[in-house]
Amino acid sequence: MALEAVVRPNASGRLMVITIAAVPLLFVISGLVIRYAAFASVSEEPGFAAYARALCRWDCAWYIDISEQGYERFPIPDHSNVGRWGFFPLYPMLVAAIRSVFPFPTILVATFISIACSYAACLVAWPLLDKNMRAYVLYCAFLLSGPFSFHFTTFLSEPLFVLLTSCVFLALKRSSYLAAGVSSALLSATRLVGVFVVFATVIQMFREHRRQGGSALSFPRWLLGRPDLLVAVLISPAGLFAYILFLYLTVGDGFAFLHIQRAFGRVAGNPLVFLWDGLSAVPKTGWLPTAPQWSALAAIAGLALSAVLAARRQYGAALFCALCIILPLITNLASMVRYVIGLAPLTMLLAILLSASKLIWLAALVLFLGACYFTTVAWIGGYLALV
């Protein structure tokens, strides 16, 4: 009986590990099948390479150029005045490094890396979802087989951004502040808004200090007395600072990633006006919302979910997500849907909320899988230009 008591828990644990690994793998396969079917329905060119090229839309082309050619040093004759500096370097560097080992086209290498990052992000999400299997299944389905899964399986920054964001919050959940700092540094080299995650780290440190009986006033002194925590905070924006230094040395403008935004039509304005303009852009024919309406609704939904995170006392995640939405919203609504769905705390929260009822969970799962085909067709066809 004693031996049986030992064997059964071990067997159960192994089965759980296999299940956790198998769930996202199944959605990797189903997502590839659905998206390839969508590609085949609108393309006469067969093959996985053609499929990967078809999904490479909009910003994907910029990342390919950075991975293959690096950043420009103006002036360059016969080139556009829109530089590549607005796109942060970590993911293109990763793709370039792996492509140097595997001699395949850039988009093929990037596609496989994106799928691998999204798969890894699902695994990291398991403890963040408090081992809620229904929420885990739904989250994996959303990333890998959902209506926006093409964002997480092509050469865009979302796969790495979601993975690193999840790593930061898992490290904070476990009070591994140095690991959180390293992940934050990498995150800040992936996208500009990644630097905001340092606020989540400081908030978690403050909460830990309060749990130990410390006062708010004594927090700075307590923090200064913990070199490990100071290092974690100070290295968090290292990726951003490294990119600023690189641009200063090569272009002569350390903030070229900000200054180039004007060439992309991003000029600071009133975010409330942008939201109103987006909601007011009613369709001239049909009943489906326009791209500006989708973007405005995504921003509103993202801010609402951030408020829910705050209500659940996940203050660090709430502040991080709100800042990641508000900063681009100050310029315009472009790519807002992509920015919102790329915020791991929000999509995890959505998965948890939708999993409260088994019937709603099942309906959401079917909706995710069913919508994947149609949204992929729209993405390939260029109808989702602003999302």
Image: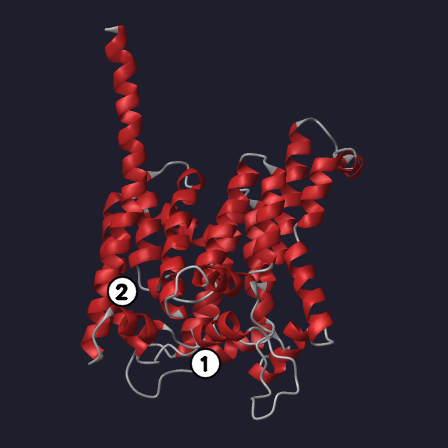
Q: For the point 30% across and 21% down, which residue is it?
A: 10
Q: Is residue 191 left or right of residue 346?
A: right
Q: How many numbered badges does the structure rendering display?
A: 2
Secondary structure beneath label 2: helix
Sequence-wise first label, 2 or 1? 1
Residue 49, label in figure: none
Q: Residue furthest top?
A: 1
Q: Residue 178 location in percent, x, y?
A: 63, 40
What colour scheme has been applied to the protein in the rendered image? secondary structure
Q: Is residue 147 visible?
A: yes
Residue 104 image-quadrant placement: bottom left
Labels 2 & 1 near each other (Cβ < 8 A): no
Residue assigned mark 2? 372
Amino acid type at circle 1 is: Ser
> How dense is the environment of label 2, judged by Cα within 10 Å: few (below 14), some, or many (20 and up)?
many
Q: For the point 56% across and 88% down, which residue is it?
A: 80
Residue 151 image-quadrant placement: bottom left
Residue assigned mark 1? 280
> How dense is the environment of label 1, judged by Cα within 10 Å: few (below 14), some, or many (20 and up)?
few
Q: Residue 195 location in percent, x, y?
A: 63, 57
Q: For the point 64% across and 33% down, which residue is it?
A: 208
Residue 79 image-quadrant placement: bottom right
Quadrant containing the C terminus in the rendered view = bottom left
Alpha-carbon distance for marks 2 and 1?
A: 27 Å
Secondary structure beneath label 1: helix
Q: Is residue 148 left or right of residue 341?
A: left
Q: Is residue 356 visible?
A: no
Give the number of the mark in front: 2 or 1. 2
Q: Residue 196 location in percent, x, y?
A: 62, 56
Quadrant containing the N terminus in the rendered view = top left
Q: Is residue 245 above or below residue 261?
A: above
Amino acid type at circle 2 is: Cys
